[in-house]
Amino acid sequence: MAISGFYKEVLGTKLYIERNEGPENGAFEILCLHTAGRETRQYHRILELLEDKYQAYAFDMPGHGKSWPLPGNAVVKNHHDAGRYIWEVAQTLGMKRVVVIGCSLGGNPVYHMAQEYPVEAICSMQGGDFTHTDEYVLNLLDHPAVSVQHSHVEYTECLVGEKCPADVNEFILWGVCCENGRTKHGDLTIYAGYDVREKMKDITCPVLVILGLDDPSVPERQVKETMSRLTGTKKLVYKPVPGYGHFILQEAPEIIVDSLKDFLGQI
């Protein structure tokens, strides 16, 4: 199993992309969206596990990981612009039957993608169609007196499920050490302003919803409210997973991939 990385210019920005060695003639191609402040390394195990059946890609949004920022050292701050980058990455890669999956900040815009772009299916992990963040939190994310790497460690750890392996938990916390305040501020600005409830009825493609139940930041009630608005989808599958939390893509990649393969095998 091998993962290769490369750069593509997308909408004038140099973005870093990684892919597995999955079959080019597979039924679907999968595009993976990272969580707030993070990057493609979150998906390494998932990319490996998908390799026998699907070609899959993960990419760093502008200003994340190894991708260049926007002009003026800026980052994306609304879900409409995020959607443009996501779709343009798929087009730049020549993807044809696109399945978009994402977690947390990445688990929200998959619904926007299904509303506005011709995706084949979506998978939302720890996501919803409506979220908010306190302005107080946003103000402290890009402040000269606050270190995001230090201030977010304990909060991140409280979001991890009790079944998460110790080495995985360590790497999730290392992800906090790699964040920067400006990028995280942009991401949570998107999160704070995210509301696509009005168009949920327009989604017709199949939808897979996966929820790690040990996540206090994304209650099951919120996810079920999101699903209740998916009145037009051809297929809706809900997979609640006890014992795992907010970073379920890293905590339980085997469960994610098994669920995704079963789901895609039925459409």
Image (tube, rainbow, N blue to C red):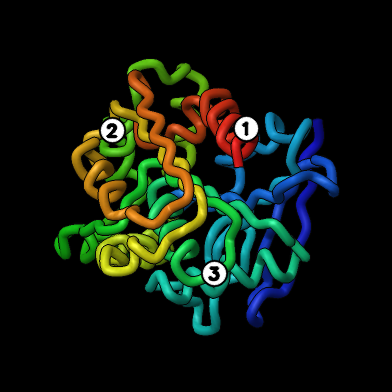
Residue 215's quadrant in the figure? top left
Disc 2 is placed on an element classified as loop
Q: CA distance from mark 3 to mark 2?
A: 29 Å
Q: Which residue is mark 3?
A: 117
Q: Which residue is mark 1?
A: 261
Q: Are marks 3 and 2 in contact (CB under 8 Å)?
A: no
Q: Earlier in the sequence, mark 1 or mark 3?
A: 3
Q: Is residue 210 above or below residue 33?
A: above
Please give left or right for residue 152 compared with residue 263 in the image. left
Residue 37's quadrant in the figure? bottom left
Q: Amino acid at mark 3?
A: Tyr
Q: Which of the two discs, 2 and 1, sits closer to the camera? A: 1
Q: Which residue is mark 2?
A: 215
Q: CA distance from mark 2 to mark 1?
A: 24 Å
Q: Amino acid at mark 1?
A: Lys
Residue at image x 78%, y 31%? 52
Front-lying residue, 78 or 150 = 78
The image shows residue 124 at horizontal and vertical percentages of 44, 46
Q: Earlier in the sequence, mark 3 or mark 2?
A: 3
Q: Amino acid at mark 2?
A: Asp
Disc 3 is placed on an element classified as loop
Q: Are marks 2 and 1 in contact (CB under 8 Å)?
A: no
The image shows residue 191 at horizontal and vertical percentages of 31, 60
